């Protein structure tokens, strides 16, 4: 995934970027970490040297691989060069970017593409599904006090008030 491309196409991250590019990156990574954990997708986020100068570096963040390309290397070049490493008969590679040229390049290599907008829709759908699942769990899970007989409830209430039963 081209990290800065996605930041630039998500309105909430674009606004955040105007204040702090570091905060926009952090927010993107947090949202992607939730998405990756929910879907089980192996996720690689590439940030090019447009905003971070220096040598190429990699780090792990919540089971995602984060790559900062070296100076003069854009994320598209890194993605094109490394997508081939993951493409095989058993693995679907999906590249998230709204760069049309990059989409065609990656599609030509056998990878699938997802625009930044489509990714945001998937993430928001996932968040709604998780919220719905949590609500279902809460409504279907019996409350502890509802499952306790009245005599035991009375005994617990007495203990809570600091009295021994039958005082």
Image (cartoon, rainbow, N blue to C red):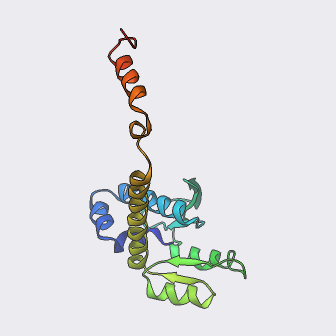
- Residue at point 58%, 55% (across, down): 59
Image quarter in which the C terminus is found: top left
Residue 103: x and y, percent? 50, 86
Q: Is residue 155 above or below residue 14?
A: above
- For image coordinates 59% across by 80% down, the residue present is 80
Q: Nearer the viewer, residue 19 or 131?
A: 131
In the image, what residue occupies the spot 36% across and 55% down?
23
Q: Is residue 152 visible?
A: yes
Spot occupied by residue 148 in the image (x, y as percentages of width and height): 43, 35
Q: Position of residue 22 (x, y in %)?
A: 38, 55
Query: Would you identify the image quadrant in which residue 116 lies?
Result: bottom left
Image position of 96 with respect to 160: above or below:
below
Residue 48, placed above or below residue 88: above
Question: Is 109 left, or right, of 99 in this rendering?
Answer: right
Residue for point 52% across, 59% down: 54
95, 149: nearer the viewer: 149
Quarter-wise, where is residue 81 in the image? bottom right
Q: How many marks?
A: 0
Q: Is residue 45 left or right of residue 4?
A: right
Q: Position of residue 110 (x, y in %)?
A: 63, 87
Q: Relative to the observer, which residue lies in front, 157 or 94?
A: 157
Q: Nearer the viewer, residue 155 or 108?
A: 155
In this image, 155 relative to 56: left or right?
left
Q: Is residue 74 visible?
A: no
Farthest top residue? Answer: 167
């Amino acid at each position: 995934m081209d990290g800065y491309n996605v930041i630039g196409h998500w309105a909430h991250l674009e606004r955040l970027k105007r204040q702090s590019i570091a905060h926009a990156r952090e927010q993107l990574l947090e949202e992607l970490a939730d998405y990756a954990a929910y879907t089980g997708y192996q996720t690689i986020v590439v940030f090019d040297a447009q905003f971070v100068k220096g040598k190429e570096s990699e780090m792990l963040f919540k089971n995602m691989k984060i790559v900062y390309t070296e100076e003069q290397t854009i994320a598209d070049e890194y993605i094109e060069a490394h997508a081939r490493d993951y493409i095989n008969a058993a693995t679907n590679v999906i590249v998230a970017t709204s760069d049309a040229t990059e989409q065609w390049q990656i599609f030509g290599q056998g990878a699938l593409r997802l625009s930044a907008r489509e990714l945001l829709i998937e993430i928001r759908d996932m968040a709604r599904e998780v919220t719905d699942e949590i609500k279902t769990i809460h409504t279907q899970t019996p409350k502890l006090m509802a499952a306790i007989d009245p005599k035991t409830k009375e005994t617990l209430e007495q203990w809570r008030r600091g009295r021994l039963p039958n005082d």
